[in-house]
Structure formats: C-alpha cells, structure tokens
Image (tube, rainbow, N blue to C red):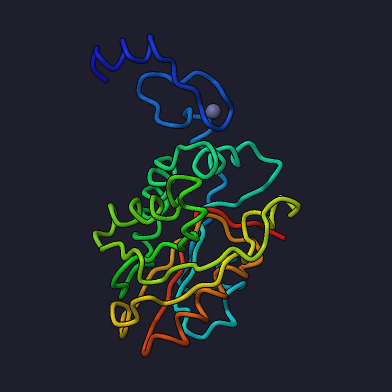
Amino acid sequence: MNLWNSVLDFLLPRYCKVCGRRLDAGEVHMCVPCFLGMPCLDYDMNGLSPAEKILMTERQVVRAASMMQYDKDSHYRNLLYNMKYYNKPKVGTWLAGIGARRLQSKGFFEGVDCIVPVPLSKRKQRRRGYNQCSFIARGVSGVIGLPVVENAVVRDVEKVRQAGLGKYQRWDNAEGLFRVAEPGVLAGRHILLVDDVMTTGSTLCSMIETIAAAVPDIKISVFTLGIVEV
Ligand SMILES: [Zn+2]
C-alpha cells in the first residue's frame, strides 16, 4: 500500500460493506474478519451441490454451484445489496473472482466455452444503469479467461412488478420473458450461466428451458454468487 493510497484513505474513508467498520488501507470492500467469516459453500464434483439439487430437473445442466449462502438476516446480504441496488456493481466482479478461483481448483469450469450473464429487460437495465450479472460474469472471466457473451439471450417484457413481492422472491422473480436472439452464437457450446442469487431457481429454469428449446446441442453450467436455503 503506497503513501498516496494511505492519504486517499485518510481523506476519503472506506467502510466494510458487511459490518460497516472503517477499512484499513490494505482491505478491499470487506474487513479481514468479515472476509474470513464469509459463509462460502464448498463444491464437490462427486456430490450434488444445493444449486444442482434445485436445477436437477433440467437435463441440459452439467454442473451448478453457488459461492455463498444467502440469508436475509445476515449482514453479508449488504454485499449483494451494494452490488444490485446501490450502484456498486464492481463488488460483484470482485466476489465472483474469489468464487471462481475456488471453483477452478475443483475443476468446475472444465469444458465450458463461454459465459452468459442472465439478462435484464432493457427498461430495467436503463433504470438501474447496469446489469449486475454482467459484472459477475466479468469477474469469472478474469479468472478462467473465457469470453462473456452478452445479448445472445435477451429479456423482452416485465411481467411481474417487483414491489409487493417477498424479500426472497424479489431476488428470484420470473419477470420478463427470455428469448434467444442469436442461437448460432451458442449452438454446440457449453455455456456458463451467471446469476446473482438463486432462491427457487424459477428464473434460471425458465432461461435454461428457453435456451434448450432454441439452441441445438447445448450444455449448460450455472454459477451464482448467493443461494437461499428455502
Ligand atoms: Zn466487516
């Protein structure tokens, strides 16, 4: 940590996005105790991960994993709130990089050809200014060196209003209809779908079924930052 960063830290203090404590010069997004206490999930190639149990009915799915447990009563949800609602999408890139390194050592990405973020509808993306899943995809791409394919799958309309949904449903509602805009780009490939938080899996299942119906000879793996135990 150089002097300039120390001066910047003094002038513009940064805070832990989990517990709110002021960060030291060498800490990024989280303080060390919060970093070490992250509710990370292990991945075992021989077992069924929580994400795989949810998606096991989709026969195109090869592997699925989530980086951490998501609990609405845990302060760790602040990380994902920052990424999704408070204009800090780079938190997602950073977290995804950590999650991807852990999974890479287990062979999770073997055979994958490219990374496809779950799209937002145009209207929603305009309102938020970004798609958080694209930032997560970039974090994974930075580790495994595979391209991120945007716009091959799009989301056309918003069907369900977010307000009025429960805390978990808000993360995982099936608003919008997926459509494969460029099937040729995905044909014959093993794609890694990337989402922020999986709850019931309904959004991912709907996207997987749409892709499987439109794209010949497709294999799909899934990575999400969080998963809710429901
Ligand atoms: Zn902290």
Q: In x, y percent, where is residue 159?
A: 64, 66
Toward the viewer: 159 or 212?
Answer: 159
Q: Is residue 46 left or right of residue 164?
A: left
Percent coordinates x, y for residue 203 in the rendering: 58, 68
Of residue 215 and residue 5, the one placed in the foreground of this image is 215
Which quadrant is home to the C terminus? bottom right
Question: Which quadrant is the N terminus positioned in?
Answer: top left
Residue 58, given in percent of the width and then of the height, sits at 55, 82
Q: Is residue 192 above or below residue 105?
A: below
Q: In percent of the image, x 43 and y 72: which residue is there?
A: 221
Q: Position of residue 17 (x, y in %)?
A: 52, 31
Q: Residue furthest bottom?
A: 216
Query: Would you place residue 178 above or below residue 85 in this image?
Result: below
Whether 91 is drawn above or below 139: the answer is above
Q: Is the residue 214 above or below the residue 53 in the image? A: below
Residue sitting at x 62%, y 60% = 172
Number of marks: 0
From the viewer's side, name the closer residue of 108 and 217: 217
For image coordinates 42% across by 52% down, the residue present is 99
At 55% from the left edge and 66% from the top edge, which residue is drawn? 157
The quadrant holding residue 26 is top left
